[in-house]
Image (cartoon, rainbow, N blue to C red):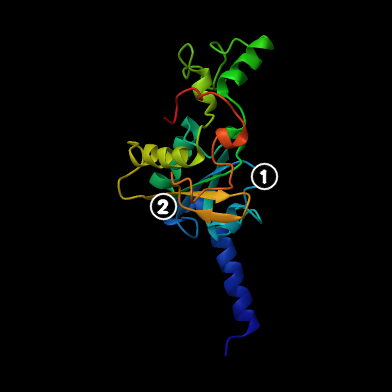
Amino acid sequence: MTTLKDQLSARVEEYTKWEIRRQYGAEGPNMRRLWVLACMDERLPVDEALGIRADSPVGGGDAHLFRNAGGIVTDDAIRSAMLTINFFGTKEIVVLQHTGCGMLSANGNDLVSALEAKGVDVDKVPIDPSLPEMSLGAGAFGKWIGMMDDVDETCMKTVDYLKNHPLIPDDIVISGWVWETEFRRLRAPTTNDDVRARTQYSTGTMGVKGPQPPRWS
């Protein structure tokens, strides 16, 4: 029979290993050897959508979780994926985007115009003040924002970018998923309009006119 003392000793030992996990590098991975790229939207419940413990409570331990506007590939997303996969033992990537996303709610060209109206020279903005070597070409700022025309197409394209990136090894399992905000339901990305009926999956369903700056097409 296991005593409470034995159980408590095992728990303390397990937590000690957990708190110094990063010191073990690839030998100290998160619980599922998983990296999640998700939208930052407060309505996207990562744990509920994926059935894991990574987002709430913080420190659940199942995955490294990276959130940004849209859950899209960016230079910092690639940097983070490269680190967790090559040095922290991660073996799988999940991309999680969602319907009704703010990245569908406006045209990127209009956002550029709004910033220029405030006096911002978008062709001279430092993308990363700590890394002045990183810069955008003239006219690229609108694409950099990353607004979407269609969340499903963007999700599939994001997966493709990750699968074909030289910093992501070929043996990494990569998948993409869409959370339907309207119905709290997870599904695979699709271009079948019957499957995604009654959801805000595109700029058109959100009343936005005109194509976005070409990043995902």
Furthest residue in direction front, as rendered: 194
In the displayed structure, does residue 162 sit left or right of residue 204? left
Of 77 and 50, the residue lying toward us: 50
Mark drawn on residue 42? 1
Kind of residue indicated by mark 1: Glu
Mark drawn on residue 56? none
Against 117, is 150 above or below?
A: below
Image x and y of residue 53, in percent? 58, 59
The image quadrant of residue 105 is top right
Location of the C terminus by quadrant is: top left
Q: Estimate how packed mark 2 is, as few (under 14), some (14 to 19) or many (20 or more) residues with alpha carbons within 10 Å.
A: some
Kind of residue indicated by mark 2: Glu
Location of the N terminus by quadrant is: bottom right
Real-space Cα separation, disc 2 to disc 1, in angstroms: 24 Å
Q: Is residue 19 visible?
A: no
For image coordinates 55% across by 37% down, the residue present is 70
Furthest residue in direction bottom, as rendered: 1
For image coordinates 61% across by 19% down, the residue present is 110
Of 97 and 187, the residue lying toward us: 187
In the displayed structure, does residue 161 sit left or right of residue 193? left
Q: Estimate how packed mark 1 is, as few (under 14), some (14 to 19) or many (20 or more) residues with alpha carbons within 10 Å.
A: few
Image x and y of residue 163, in percent? 35, 42
Query: Which comes before the other along the chain, label 2 or label 1?
Result: 1
For image coordinates 45% across by 24% down, the residue present is 214
Against 104, is 109 above or below?
A: above
Image x and y of residue 18, in percent? 55, 59
Q: Which one is closest to the eye, mark 2 or mark 1?
A: 1
User: Mark 2 falls on what kind of element?
Assistant: strand
Q: Which residue lies under the disc numbered 2?
A: 92
Q: Is residue 216 visible?
A: yes
